[in-house]
């Protein structure tokens, strides 16, 4: 048992991060290779100016028309995406672990704040799940795998929350937390979560088509 | 959306969609083998990383729904949302690896050809900028290869293929029509000419085939404007004069490319400086955005100027002056292919304000305007689909009605015809006009003399 825990707390963390980072790099390289081989015309239209213009326009809350028309969804979505990075990166217990391993550290969130923010993330995921059930145009597009995606993101946060409060089965909760966190990282490059890097690319292309050829805004 | 507009026809049940004899005859000839091979061939050989990214990245969030005229017009029925249409076509094809049924294809061709104007409004509402119009055009491509394209639009493609124009206009009829309009116009301006094949002219003026076929008066108006503005212009007498391109909207890329090639080659033969085209949206899309790409040019080999831009130039340089502004209250419809497709919406407003006294905008407008519901080849699928087109355009009718305008300016042929249908069906009591109609009505009928101020670019 101890050997197993040592493994998931040690080498497995390395493996998960490597797969996450190398997987995303591999994905990006494959896309570029594919574009060069099959759709090199993309470069005739792609410009830095229009790509960045479009990406930044879509990063500004309530600037694009679409975001104005669905304010509740976008508010929750913006906060969710930010917290998805902020909470794990600035969590005291994570920083302590990193400090033990590498002797580096950075500013940490107050534990009680992190606790509330974790609940916010879980609430956002519950909102997404309910939205999938109740909004007809979303329900129509939803399949079982969409709930699995929500579950995969939710697990590390739920188990982390339970482990922190030590409500029950503390040891098991920590193990589940570590494993589900690692699974999430491994899953990102090979699932729809790869929109992390693909969405800026599709946005850049559409932004360039609109800015460069169509002389129109795309937000 | 307000509920004060009544629908005359009963809404169609989603499952019982219209079809036509060409679609049915094509479906009857299909074998499972051919369906599978054709779909996989197109999806594997004719697509690339863009397609892959669009399909793999869509998070099924449903935010594109809000953008779609069809979704909004059908009481937010999710099967009309952009991603909903992709689900019923592309996703199904991918999931079944091409082994889809004839019923699936009947539905797919109906969705791609008559329930999407390929207006690209939804790519402005998708946070990732996924191009659903491109996906619908891919479905049309598959349907073309399976020979199940709707009858009426296929006929226009056949005409393009045989005559290089959309309406089976014969070469002598074309020349004859131009000369007839020239003769009529000479009663107003005695020196007026419609110069045919004038090599080295500054401007090649080009129109779509419905103009000589049944709207010859538009040629008269255009000739008058050209003459009054003192433009050194010409029109080609040979095939290549028609800038329309219905093959672009049926996925018949090969014929679409031939049409665009004939068009540019005609301009090259006449050694003109630039091409000016009449008030048509899809023809602009074909010659400014699509045809050139098929032929290997990133941007068109000639400067292609839409009528809107040309009018703007004539009015701001003073080549054309307005005697008395148009009195009635007007509103302006932004055709997708020149607003979202070329950013001419602000120019269109400037021109409208230069020639009209009272202009009310419609909402939403500019890049965000709703499509007329006729574009992208939808109206060209013809009478079998008109009833449902009217239902699918309900949100557009509400948008028009809210302006309270007496006159609706539609600087695009497809829009013009589609909007006339909407106005009639929903009793909107509006007069649909081209911008050229109003300029012709209000301009001073004097001829620009060389040396007068009015330097063109």
Image: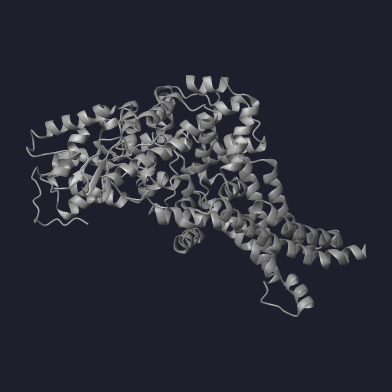
| Count of labels in the image | 0
x, y percent for residue B16:
53, 22
Residue B393 in sight in this render: yes
- Front residue (pair A121, B304): B304
State whether residue A218 appears in this view.
no
Q: In this view, does B37 lie to the left or right of B257?
A: right
Horizontal and vertical percent position of residue B206:
27, 40
Figure quadrant of the N terminus of chain B: top left
Pick the residue in front: A122 or B342: B342
The location of residue B151, given as percent across then percent down, is: 44, 24
Q: In this view, does A61 lie above or below A73?
A: below
A79, above or below B100, in the image? below
Image position of A159 (left or right of B180): right
Q: In which quarter of the image is residue A28?
A: bottom right
Relative vertical location of residue B28 with respect to residue A128 in this rendering, above or below: above
**What residue lies at 14% left-to-right and 51% top-to-bottom?**
B319
Question: Residue at horizontal 46%, vertical 40%?
Answer: B68
Q: Which of B85 and B287 is in front in this view?
A: B287
- The residue at the point 70 percent across, 53 percent down is A190
| The C terminus of chain B - image quarter | bottom left
Relative depth, front residue between B231 and A109: B231
Q: Residue A67 location in percent, x, y?
A: 49, 53
- Residue sticking out furthest to the bottom: A103
Q: Which colour scheme is used?
A: one colour
Quadrant hosting residue B198: top left
Q: In this view, does A87 lie to the left or right of A68?
A: right
């Amino acid at each position: 048992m101890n050997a197993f825990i040592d493994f998931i707390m040690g080498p497995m963390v390395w493996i998960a991060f490597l797969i996450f980072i190398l997987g995303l790099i591999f994905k990006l390289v494959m896309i570029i290779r594919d574009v060069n081989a099959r759709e090199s015309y993309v470069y005739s239209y792609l410009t830095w100016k229009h790509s960045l213009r479009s990406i930044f326009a879509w990063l500004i809350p309530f600037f694009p028309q679409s975001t104005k028309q669905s304010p509740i969804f976008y508010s929750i979505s913006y906060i969710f995406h930010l917290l998805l990075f902020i909470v794990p990166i600035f969590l005291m217990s994570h920083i302590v672990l990193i400090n033990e391993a590498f002797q580096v550290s950075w500013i940490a969130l107050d534990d009680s704040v992190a606790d509330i923010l974790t609940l916010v993330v879980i609430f956002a995921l519950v909102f997404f799940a309910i939205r999938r059930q109740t909004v007809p145009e979303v329900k129509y597009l939803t399949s079982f795998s969409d709930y699995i995606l929500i579950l995969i993101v939710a697990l590390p946060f739920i188990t982390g929350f339970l482990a922190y409060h030590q409500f029950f089965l503390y040891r098991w909760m920590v193990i589940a937390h570590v494993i589900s966190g690692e699974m999430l990282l491994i899953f990102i490059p090979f699932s729809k979560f790869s929109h992390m890097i693909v969405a800026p690319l599709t946005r850049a292309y559409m932004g360039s088509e609109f800015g460069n050829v169509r002389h129109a805004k795309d937000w | 959306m307000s509920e004060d507009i009544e629908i005359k026809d009963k809404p169609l049940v989603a499952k019982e969609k219209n079809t036509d004899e060409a679609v049915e005859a094509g479906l009857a000839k299909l074998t499972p083998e051919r369906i599978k091979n054709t779909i996989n061939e197109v999806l594997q050989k004719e697509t690339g990383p863009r397609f892959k990214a669009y399909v793999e990245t869509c998070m099924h969030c449903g935010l594109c729904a809000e953008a779609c005229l069809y979704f909004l017009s059908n009481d937010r029925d999710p099967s009309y949302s952009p991603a909903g249409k992709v689900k019923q076509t592309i996703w199904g094809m991918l999931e079944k690896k091409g082994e889809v049924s004839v019923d699936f294809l009947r539905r797919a061709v109906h969705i791609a050809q008559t329930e999407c104007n390929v207006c690209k409004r939804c790519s402005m509402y998708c946070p990732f900028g996924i191009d659903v119009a491109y996906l619908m055009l891919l479905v049309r491509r598959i349907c073309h290869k399976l020979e199940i394209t709707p009858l009426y639009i296929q006929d226009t493609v056949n005409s393009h293929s045989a005559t290089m124009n959309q309406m089976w206009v014969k070469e002598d009829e074309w020349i004859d029509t131009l000369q007839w309009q020239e003769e009529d116009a000479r009663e107003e301006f005695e020196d007026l000419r419609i110069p045919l094949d004038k090599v080295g002219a500054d401007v090649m003026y080009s129109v779509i085939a419905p103009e000589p076929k049944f709207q010859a008066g538009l040629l008269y108006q255009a000739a008058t404007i050209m003459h009054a503005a003192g433009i050194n212009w010409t029109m080609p007498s040979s095939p290549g004069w028609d800038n329309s391109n219905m093959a672009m909207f049926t996925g018949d890329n090969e014929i679409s490319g031939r049409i665009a090639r004939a068009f540019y080659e005609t301009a090259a033969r006449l050694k003109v400086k630039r091409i000016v085209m009449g008030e048509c949206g899809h023809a602009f899309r074909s010659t400014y955005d699509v045809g050139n790409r098929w032929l290997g040019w990133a941007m068109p080999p000639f400067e292609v100027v839409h009528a809107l831009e040309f009018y703007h130039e004539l009015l701001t340089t003073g080549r054309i002056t307005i005697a008395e502004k148009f009195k009635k209250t007007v509103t302006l419809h932004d055709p997708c292919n020149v607003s979202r497709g070329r950013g001419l919406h602000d120019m269109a407003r400037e021109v409208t304000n230069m020639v009209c006294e009272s202009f009310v905008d419609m909402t939403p407008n500019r890049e965000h305007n709703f499509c007329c519901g006729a574009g992208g080849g939808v109206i060209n699928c013809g009478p079998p689909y008109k009833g449902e087109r009217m239902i699918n355009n309900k949100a557009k009718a509400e948008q028009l009605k809210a302006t309270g305008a007496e006159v609706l300016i539609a600087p695009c042929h497809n829009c013009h015809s589609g909007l006339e249908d909407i106005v009639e069906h929903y009793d909107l009591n509006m007069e649909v006009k081209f911008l050229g109609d109003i300029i012709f009505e209000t301009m001073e009928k004097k001829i620009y003399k060389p040396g007068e101020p009015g330097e063109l670019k």
